[in-house]
Amino acid sequence: MSNSPSQQHGFRTVFRVVSGNFLEMYDFMVYGFYAAAIAKTFFPSGNEFASLMLSLATFGAGFLMRPLGAIILGAYIDHHGRRKGLIMTLVLMALGTLLIACVPGYASIGVAAPLLVLAGRLLQGFSAGVELGGVSVYLAEIAKPGKKGFYVAWQSASQQVAVIFAGLLGVVLHAKLSPEEMGEWGWRIPFLIGCLIVPFLFLIRRSLEETEEFKTRKHRPSINEIYRSMLENWRIIVAGCMMVVMTTVSFYMITAYTPTFGKTVLKLDDVDNLIVTMCVGLSNFIWLPLMGALSDRVGRKPLLVIFTILTLLTAYPAVSWLVAEPSFGRLLMVELWLSFLYGSYNGAMVVTLTEVMPPAVRTAGFSLAYSLATALFGGFTPAIATYLIHSTGNKAAPGLWLMFAAACGLIATLVIFRGGRQHAYVEPVAKTA
């Protein structure tokens, strides 16, 4: 089949690249799925809303470390190589996951419990700040000409496998354990499973080779040169950040926030909510590579413009229709529609971000744009959605938040492709003796 990654580097190479990306997203998903149980364990309060908000804020706090990870680890990867950086991010992510899985509850060690959980989330966020950028750049640099969109789409597609796996595991646990057992200790099982698969992921990622594009580069910029180039290209980074807002808000709304929204707002069954989330992950997995390949044929801009406009027009009406008469069927239909919008936009967006960044600082620039959007908007989407509903009394308010994200994506797309052509970056200039 002409679109297969095996034509140049093989499925096994792509699998090794995205393996750590699976762990990064899996860890973030299980925290989002079990935010209510984590709230009771580490953030006890007489007010259920306050406890949940503290738990969701801690979930979002991990995203605040992403820009720092993007700057520090991104510069390291652009200077030392893609392979070394991808191994480092996997190790850091594993340490954060282990910490969250093993910390005793508030009843056992008091205030140290939420502080240690926060430390684990910050460590995860620091690593994740460059994981997506490192994987996307690696895939872009090994892609066959004319297939870059298809290759890079597997970065996001691998995350959907994590969503499906985390959802399936949740369904099994809810079938085997009582609600009381899940709340007391069952929620820790997914985190422990994440720890158990780390050695396997480490072994397969160690076998990666450095990309030819990086190995043949005559000049490898110093750390100072990388930072200077990022400052010179701040306009592209800001525009890229706005493009990512649409992706990160929609993704976390239809995945990490779905179980919480379904349970606390729609009052639906936990298992039903997890099944919907699994279906969303499967839908995302299908649309992402398809639309990445389509963007190789028709261009990036048409897909970016069409699907931001569709989101602007349909997000709030769809969520309003859902909350008017909540049901499993309506939740599934709305989430699958939003999944189609997300997958179609993101399939073209991620590869665009690798193309507009200067090659010498591609990882750092990509990662900073992506992590800023995630830190400021996407990571706090569950908390923001919860707050909007609480403060306005409008259960469909998350749809307005998604419309705002779509507007950011549309404006950024028009800026980057203004005048009918992609905005050019400024090449870094090496210092001479």
Image (tube, rainbow, N blue to C red):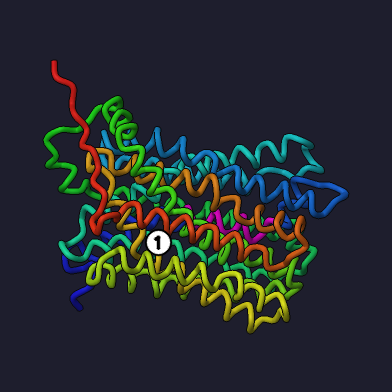
Residue 12's image quarter?
bottom left
Q: Looking at this rendering, what residue extends furthest in the bottom direction?
A: 329
Query: On the rendered structure, is 84 left or right of 101?
Result: left
Q: Residue at x 59, y 59 (%)?
A: 401
Residue 186's image quarter?
bottom right
Q: Position of residue 120 (x, y in %)?
A: 59, 41
Magenta-drawn segment: 24-35
Residue 26 on the magenta segment: yes
Predominant SS of the magenta segment? helix
- Please indicate, yes or no, whether residue 207 appears anywhere in the rendered image: no
Up-down: is 350 above or below 276? above
Q: Position of residue 182 (x, y in %)?
A: 73, 63
Q: Residue at x 53, y 45 (%)?
A: 375
SS assignment at label 1: helix
- Badge 1 density bin: few <14, some 14–19, many ≥20, Cα 10 Å: many
Q: Residue at x 66, y 69 (%)?
A: 173
Q: Which residue is mark 1?
A: 156
Q: Residue at x 34, y 71 (%)?
A: 291
For badge 1, the amino acid type reads Ser
Q: Position of residue 132 (x, y in %)?
A: 39, 51
Query: On the rendered structure, is 378 left or right of 44?
Result: left
Q: Nearer the viewer, residue 393 or 57?
A: 393
